[in-house]
Image (cartoon, rainbow, N blue to C red):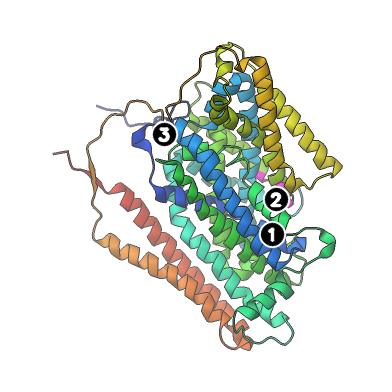
Amino acid sequence: MNQPESITDRVDALYEFEREPVSEDKLESGRHFAALFGGEHVAGTEFVIGAAFVAWGASAADVLIGLLIGNALAVLSWTFICAPIAVQTRLTLYWYLRKIAGPGVTAVYNVLNAFLFCILSGTMITVSASAIRIPFGIPPQTKWYPEDLRFVFIVLVVGAVVVSVAILGFKRLAQFSEVCVPWLFAMFAAGAVGMLPVLANASPGMGAIGGVADLWRIAQEQIWLRDPESGLGVWHIIAFAWICNLAFHVGLSDMAVLRFAPKARYGLLSACGMYLGHYAAWVCAGVMGAAAALILKRPLAELDAGEVAFQSLGLSGVLAVIIAGWATSNPTLYRAGLALQAVTPGWPRWLVTLLAGIATTVVACFPFVFTKLLSFVALFGILLSPVGAIVFVEHWLFPRLGLCQFWFSTTGKTISVPALSAWVISVSIALGLWFSEALHEFFIAIPLWFVSAALYTVFAAAAGARTSAPVVEESGEPVTRPVETAPPAAKQRPSWLKAVGLVALLSLLVQFVLPLWVMTGDPSAYDSKLPNYHLWLSAASIIHLVTIAAWVLVSERTVVRTAEP
């Protein structure tokens, strides 16, 4: 009689190709990448960053044009720098780096990478907890330490959910995002549109919003008020939008995700995150932040993401911040687990991810990064992107320059001095520029990448990359292990599932229509409409999330093997 599997046996079976190439039978569909990018970048921190643009004193034109260009640069970086290397190697950066820089540098990088990812993931958990605190009457946690033990308890509960999903692996992360992304986008849009009458009433002489001209007037007079003394303009916005995820694309950390992509062009699906999240959501969050500050008659800097969302969307706003924080924290913690997996031989990924998740949850109890998020994002890119430059030049440029790929692996040494020196010198230059304020923090990371690439090329050539060490030929095709052929699968969805999908679609459309009903009509009736708006929006949200979750999960599970008797 077979013994039932223990929980440990089940999580041990969640194999994610941590130390070898992903096999062809495990590649994922485009919708999973679209959902994952969208879910990760339509996040709770968008409330923080979108509101920060308002507090910066950037003009409306600077924000709209700067985000358009900066996010395009980010998408191109994913598509032409990160995705091709991920698809050709099918490895995580954390394991591929070992072939280039040796186990010593790889261990240092992976531990630093995991540490920073844990802090970033902890920030997302803090954002989610900032929403849950509202029904319990807990005040905003705006200091670096927690001011209420109930907030700590909430963080522990949220962290447990995040860790559980991250342990389940790539596919479950993608499914989670697939359920949440359309609804999260609807929430950002509904919050912004529903708050426009608040801003219109604050503009002298403006009644009902009549068209684009009125919207532009609101944007200039009530949201993005140009502050000449801030010194921040369109170039700062472009730079920030590009470097916001620099460690992920140019720094190659997203090889962990894109190694499951059938083609390098799947990097273009990062646009789902950049333009739904880092464009539309940031703009919508700016609108909501400005309106919430007016309603509460408090400076925007004193409001957290939960308060902004609650004022704009009611209880559905609280739910939106919770899920948005989860959607970003899950894949971030997943990367942290993979990074640590590369330096803990013999440890299963689930155990490493669990330990990283515990550390992340402890960090989330202290909202210090939440208050300095923009600076942390810049520092994140500065510390990690130089290693991405080292991998990029060895993978693509060394064969063209007559240098030997993976030359260091033939030396038998542990630490690549050229790689470590290029990394340390680049970061030292960057930190010197930062602390001397010779260059704004948003403008440091991109030139730093090129400096690191040039230094490593020179150092490696001098250290032995020009010798007759054997060249490892790259065919240009994904390197994968032999695959066992599985019987063809045919999906057979039950007939009732169509009705569930229709309800999910209609409830989502309702959430786009409701804010239009609030925005139009007599401005004096706005206050009386608002409670009903929040009530119906919350009801539609719950119906949508339940039905779309059922649709996604049942669709994935109803697979019948046609070759079976």
- Identity of the amino acid at label 3? Leu
- Identity of the amino acid at label 2? Phe
Q: Is residue 344 visible?
A: no
Numbered circle sitting on residue 14: 3
Classify 142 as above or below 455.
below
Secondary structure of residue under mark 1? loop
- Identity of the amino acid at label 1? Asp
Q: Which residue is mark 2?
A: 370
- Residue 563: image quadrant is top left
Looking at the picture, tell me which residue is in the foreground, 253 or 180: 253
* Residue 371 belongs to the span the image colors magenta: yes
Q: Position of residue 528 (x, y in %)?
A: 59, 84
Chain part drawn in magenta: 364-374
Q: Position of residue 271 (x, y in %)?
A: 52, 53
Numbered circle sitting on residue 279: none
Q: Which residue is mark 1?
A: 304
Query: First in sequence: mark 1 or mark 3?
Result: 3
Query: First in sequence: mark 3 or mark 2?
Result: 3
- Alpha-carbon span between mark 1 and mark 3: 36 Å
* Rendered residue at 53%/27% (across/down): 96
Mark 2 Cα-neighbour bin, 10 Å: few <14, some 14–19, many ≥20:
many
Secondary structure of residue under mark 2? helix
Q: Answer whether labels 2 and 1 touch (C-beta < 8 Å).
A: yes
Taking 267 as reference, is 221 left or right? Answer: right
* Residue 437 belongs to the span the image colors magenta: no
